[in-house]
Image (cartoon, rainbow, N blue to C red):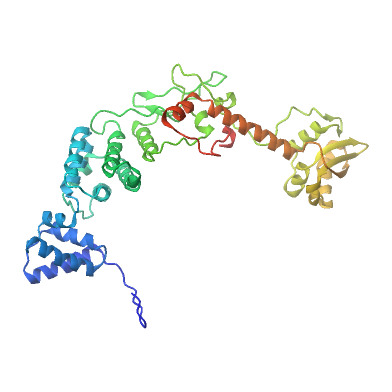
Amino acid sequence: MLSRCLQFNLKRLDEAQISGQINRILDAEGIAVEPGAVRQLSKAADGSLRDGLSLLDQAIAYTGGELTDAAVATMLGSVDHTRVGALLEALADGDGEALLAEVAALAEFSPDWGGVLEALTEALHRIQVRQLVPSAAVESDGVDVDGLAGRLRPELVQLWYQMALHGRRDLPLAPSPRAGFEMSVLRMLAFRPAGEGGEPRPVPATRRSGASTPDGPAPVARAENDNPTPVAPASAGAIDTASAELAVAAQVEVVATTATASHRVAEPGVRETAFPEQNRMVPQDDSVSLAPAPGLADGAIVDAEGWLDWLTRCELRGPARVLAEHAGFIRSGDGTLALALAEGDELLNKPALVNEIAQALAPLFGAPPRVQFELSDRPAESLRRRTERVRDERQVAAEQAFMDDPEVQRLIQQHGARVVPDSIRPFHDA
């Protein structure tokens, strides 16, 4: 609050402080009130005692001096929390018909569906507190907190809480508020760990390597050497929880990574589509690995392949290696090694760095050779350029392999999925 001469920094009051003041006023006035009515007024005040007292005056006038929970809820247009409890009971039972029946009953009151999701998150918060901190005081507020805390697994409560938050966020994007709310609670119904009431839900087809179904571990893609890698079966709860977390986003969008394609579990009768090197799961280094010393003669480097092979094997570090990686081979002989630099790289040529390269070449030449650098418009291929070329070729091949995958094509054609630009990476880069 800011006036001409004074500035007041006021803090928001919590619900307990506001409800305490409301109860004190009602006791002094001799007005009967139900605890739920005071709780609703305190919550609607949103931290402002002045707003809380204004709402209290309106409630007294609206109810004729009898502040019942139902009357105050009607005045505020808030959700009957017993309905929220019924929704959670239907979810806990895995009863889709009862769940939609409760949604239909709520729709008769034309509620604010975002407010219903908010009430759902509050109820899930109280249930989680009861599960993890049993000694903490928790109000039931129309929900069987103790019963639901005993029936639901803590990780499932966390998952439903996240789904409710995401559903509230995405509500403006839904065809209608009711449809958005129904999809949120149906998502909670669809992704429930097996054995948590009702029949087990099917695990989505896309799995990571090493995941297992409730009946046992899924078969693992066999490498070319026919030696399968042993995989420890994961718990069913962990799999379903992971699958549910993937589904929480509820976006028809393929996050395209070839790491996912390389980790795909091979189903019976399904042909592998990833690269052979991806199926072998052998990480590769970005640097170029060449055949053993094709251009190395006794005591000399005789061609460009020999220069690049030596450079990939040597122990040069720091600025000297950067200079060497930018240099292409020209010629070698009589204790002299001539290298080419592009015109934009001449600033790398420093005498101390050249001397360091010569000392590194000494074991090969028998003595430190004389290293010369020449500027060239079109120098021979350097290690840096070769590495970039090979990396670009791998990137193009990875993108093509991913887009040729039948499952990816099915998602694009049937579900309108799209590949996120620049999200595909070769397996060894993932």
**Residue closer to the observer: 295 or 361:** 295
Q: Quadrant of the N terminus?
A: bottom left
Q: Residue furthest front?
A: 175
> Residue 401: x, y in percent?
56, 27
Instruction: Tell me, yes or no, if residue 352 can be seen here.
Output: yes
Question: For the view shown, which residue lies furthest in the top direction?
Answer: 269
Q: Is residue 207 left or right of residue 18?
A: right
Residue at the (59%, 26%) spot, across then down: 277
From the top left corner, tell me how far across and down residue 421 is, in percent. Answer: 54, 39
Above-or-below relation of 304 to 276: below
Q: Quadrant of residue 102?
A: top left
Which of the 4 image quadrants contains residue 243? top left
The residue that appears at 28% across and 44% down in the rendered structure is: 177
Front residue of this view, candidates 390 and 228: 390
Q: Residue at x 23, y 54 (%)?
A: 136
> Which quadrant does the C terminus fall into?
top right
Residue 327 lies, in percent from the top left, at 79, 41
Q: Is residue 80 above or below residue 89?
A: below
| Residue drawn at point x = 37 percent, y = 33 percent | 239
Can I make out residue 146 in this image? no
Query: Is residue 219 shown left or right of residue 101?
Result: right
Residue nearest the viewer, comparing 259 with 415: 415
